[in-house]
Image (cartoon, rainbow, N blue to C red):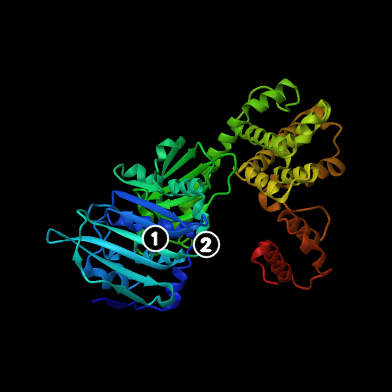
């Protein structure tokens, strides 16, 4: 006799869970199999006569679903038994905690069936579980019966598919690479696990061109506890959707974010730490967590450096051509680290410009030389202007502009160069100042009030940084204007009142100017 279970949560919640994107839903079903200690997981998409997908099947050889636990597993959504354990019976770290993954198959089709085979006192028993989209709060199951199978496991079958969603699964190569990217660290950690998609096994080692990793420490300021974080970058030998995966120590993926790196560097990045195991265990895996944000930001520095170096290396041949043409704007070897990074960024930009704007390849030598010289000087003296120069001169599309902007963001080069230039300029001024004061020959023609004082007015920092925005014989209003300009808030200048009766009004306006645009209320 068939048995029914009433799911004890709102249909709205289940509906939201069942609206997962197709790729994510498929991954959740695979993670469920991994959590069940499966060693072999098979995903198959069966086609209909029209070439579409008629059904999806995920089969594993895990420990199966125990008949006695069905009500606990399916009836209390949000209270999975995994929440009370850290590891599976075979010692694997759990991916899921809330028991929501099993329902996500409903984002692919209207009906879902679980055929479970489990060990009961040395005997393999079998039964089926059913769930339908039009009655999400009701779970039905058949009675137990002795199985003809010799091994335990679960077969999940999804039918009455939504073609608008599931047709993406017909792109087998794309889906295979996406699954490969997600499960790579897990498959590398658990060598005995095999996952196949339409009979093609996912073997990350066949697609890996290069790997690089770094380990750093994160100290939780709340309890002073120390965590080790590993950044693993895999560069693939095939095109792939670039993502940053946040994983536990053993490569179990808990969250993923899209990477906005250059399209020419096909990478996946895995940020692995027991800190993320703890966040997942407490259901607080969110960017709102301070540790989550800090660890990701630290990893991004490593990622950006890797991408910059890869792009720079790939540019070697093309840069050699520029040098052979004698249009390369640098001479000799880099003098220091800043010079080296500046040249790396220039090399990357030069190559990208040749890709996006082929017309530059056909211009004469002098035009090329002038163009590259312009980019070099912009990088050195005003890095923030480079994107504007490139977009206006080469009329790039919005997508191309965004990618070039990302290239410039691969490094803190703009701030490094700006700081370096300030320091360099100040050192030159100090040297000149020393000569004006102590060198009798140099100081003779310099008049104190009309020349020396005027020179000092542009370098008031010598008296302390607090005087940096001071100016000669002007009102506090003009000092305020200079300060607002330095903050990049020029749009506020026209609204400055002509006069102030109280100094605290100035203070309030200075405070307003210091608030970023996005943080101000209209």
Q: Position of residue 499 (x, y in %)?
A: 82, 70
Q: Position of residue 155 (x, y in %)?
A: 32, 59
* Secondary structure at numbered mark 1: loop
- Of residues 463 and 487, the one nearer the viewer is 487
292 relative to 225 in the view: left or right: right
Query: Quadrant where the N terminus lies?
Result: bottom left
Q: Earlier in the sequence, mark 2 or mark 1?
A: 2
Q: Visible in this render: residue 436?
A: no
Residue picked out by circle 1: 222
- Picture residue at 39% right of the left edge, 52% below the top: 43
* Secondary structure at numbered mark 2: helix
Query: Quadrant where the C terminus lies?
Result: bottom right
Q: Position of residue 197 (x, y in %)?
A: 41, 48
Q: Position of residue 351 (x, y in %)?
A: 68, 34
Residue picked out by circle 2: 163
Instruction: Decide: few, some or many residues near mark 2? Use Cα within 10 Å; few <14, some 14-19, many ≥20.
Output: some
- Picture residue at 67% right of the left edge, 27% below the top: 319
Separation of marks 2 and 1 at Cα, in angstroms: 49 Å
Where 426 falls versus 441 (above or below)? below
């Amino acid at each position: 006799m068939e048995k029914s279970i009433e799911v004890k949560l709102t249909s709205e919640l289940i509906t939201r869970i069942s609206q997962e994107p197709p790729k994510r839903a498929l991954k959740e079903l695979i993670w469920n199999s991994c959590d069940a200690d499966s060693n072999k997981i098979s995903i198959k998409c069966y086609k209909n006569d029209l070439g579409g997908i008629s059904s999806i099947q995920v089969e594993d050889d895990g420990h199966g679903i125990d008949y006695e636990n069905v009500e606990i597993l399916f009836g209390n959504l949000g209270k999975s038994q995994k929440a009370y354990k850290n590891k599976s019976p075979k010692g694997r770290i759990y991916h899921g905690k809330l028991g929501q993954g099993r329902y996500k198959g409903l984002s692919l089709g209207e009906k879902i069936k679980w055929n479970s085979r489990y060990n009961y006192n040395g005997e393999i028993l079998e039964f089926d579980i059913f769930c339908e989209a039009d009655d999400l709060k009701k779970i039905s199951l058949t009675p137990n019966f002795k199985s003809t199978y010799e091994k335990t496991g679960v077969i999940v079958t999804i039918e009455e598919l939504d073609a608008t969603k599931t047709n993406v699964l017909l792109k087998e190569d794309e889906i295979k690479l996406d699954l490969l990217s997600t499960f790579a660290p897990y498959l590398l950690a658990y060598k005995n696990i095999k996952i196949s998609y339409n009979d093609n096994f996912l073997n990350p080692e066949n697609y890996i061109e290069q790997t690089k990793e770094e380990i750093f420490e994160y100290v939780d300021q709340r309890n002073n506890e120390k965590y080790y974080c590993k950044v693993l970058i895999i560069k693939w030998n095939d095109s792939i959707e670039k993502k940053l995966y946040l994983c536990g120590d053993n490569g179990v993926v808990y969250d993923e974010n899209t990477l906005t790196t250059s399209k020419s560097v096909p990478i996946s990045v895995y940020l692995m730490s027991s800190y993320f195991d703890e966040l997942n265990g407490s259901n607080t895996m969110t960017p709102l967590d301070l540790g989550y944000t800090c660890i990701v930001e630290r990893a991004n520095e490593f990622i950006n450096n890797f991408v910059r170096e890869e792009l720079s290396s790939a540019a070697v041949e093309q840069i050699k051509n520029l040098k052979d043409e004698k249009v390369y704007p640098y001479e000799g070897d880099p003098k220091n680290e800043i010079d080296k990074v500046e040249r790396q960024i220039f090399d990357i930009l030069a190559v990208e410009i040749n890709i996006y704007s082929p017309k530059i390849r056909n211009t004469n030598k002098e035009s090329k030389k002038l163009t590259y010289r312009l980019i070099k000087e912009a990088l050195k003296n005003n890095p923030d202007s480079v994107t504007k120069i490139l977009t206006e001169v080469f009329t790039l599309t919005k997508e191309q502009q965004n990618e070039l902007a990302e290239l410039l963001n691969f490094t803190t080069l703009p701030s490094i160069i700006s700081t370096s230039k300030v320091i360099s300029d100040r050192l030159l001024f100090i040297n000149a100042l020393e000569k004006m004061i102590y060198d009798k020959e140099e100081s003779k023609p310099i008049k104190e009030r009309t020349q020396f004082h005027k020179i000092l007015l542009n370098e008031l920092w010598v008296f302390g940084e607090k005087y940096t925005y001071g100016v000669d014989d002007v009102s506090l209003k003009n000092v305020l204007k200079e300060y607002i300009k330095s903050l990049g808030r020029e749009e506020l200048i026209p609204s400055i009142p002509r006069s102030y009766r109280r100094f605290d009004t100035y203070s309030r306006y200075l405070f307003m100017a210091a608030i970023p645009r996005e943080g101000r209320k209209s």
